[in-house]
Amino acid sequence: MFKARSPSSGMERVKVYSKSGKSFTMGSGLFARAFMDRFPLLPVEDEGRLQDPGIRENFIERVFVYHRWQEFVEQGGRTRDLVAFHAAHKYLIMSHSSKHLKELGVLVSNPGQFERAELPARYFMTLMDGLRLTATRKKHANVLQHMAGYFKKQLSFFEKQELLDVIGQYRRGLVPLVVPLTLIRHYVGKYEEPYLKDQLYLAPHPLELMLRNHV
């Protein structure tokens, strides 16, 4: 986390002056720029921007993804484990970028085309690039509707309508993300849906942080 507009550690919107000191452009602080160049995939954010609930949730989400990736690497980074990692993050990635989800799916489906170390490196770079993109209400609603499809045979007419109504209310900005998520988590437990049970989209960070209560 960087200090907002600091000449040394400001992530963006820092005045960078010419040698004459008479003109300037907007850029990054000296330390911040060197740090981001050295660790381009590490989640970073400006302290001022973290006042925005959506940006704050995205930053913390990326921090936990980064941590899970480190655990994956420490456990050997095997291809079969990468497949499981990708499957568990499918809807989380979709909520940011369907384009990146497709690209990652191609990588995972064709491991033989890469050297052993190249595949995870390319996967992680593409993953973190995609997660930087904003997860909008429209994107979240799309993910929620995909998840709702898993219950089309189990839900009663009333339950289906209730779920679709809540997703629609979220899309229109009437309720926060936690409302439809809570209902879907309820159905995942009630009907023991195995694939959704492992989806980290439903709990990408500790619920106690309540980050999705305001987005």
Image (cartoon, helix red, strand yellow):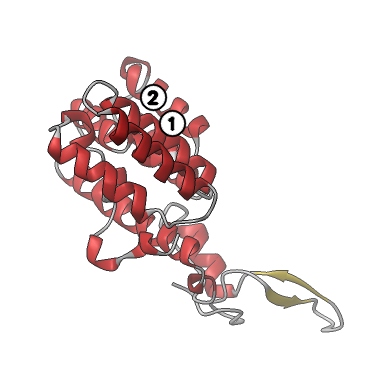
Residue type for callout 2: Gly
Query: Image point 27% across, 42% down: which residue?
Result: 184
Across and down, in percent, residue 118 comes to 36, 31
Tag 1, which secondary structure?
Answer: helix
Across and down, in percent, residue 9 comes to 53, 77
Mark 1, residue position: 101
Query: Image point 37% across, 59% down: which residue?
Result: 212
| Quadrant in which the C terminus is drawn | bottom left
> How many callouts does the rendering have?
2
Up/down of 50 relative to 140, above or below:
below
Q: Compute the Cα span from label 2 to label 1.
A: 6 Å
Image quadrant in which you'd find residue 101? top left
Across and down, in percent, residue 163 comes to 35, 39
Q: Nearer the viewer, residue 98 or 120?
A: 98
The answer to the question of whether label 2 and label 1 lie on touching residues, with beta carbons closer than 8 A, is yes
Answer with left or right where residue 134 lies relative to residue 87. right
Across and down, in percent, residue 69 comes to 27, 46
Say whether residue 26 is visible.
yes
Mark 2, residue position: 105
Label 2, residues with CA under 10 Å away: few <14, some 14-19, many ≥20: some
Q: Nearer the viewer, residue 43 or 17?
A: 43
Query: Image point 53% across, 42% down: which residue?
Result: 138
Residue type for callout 1: Leu
Up/down of 107 relative to 24, above or below:
above
Image quadrant in which you'd find residue 30? bottom right
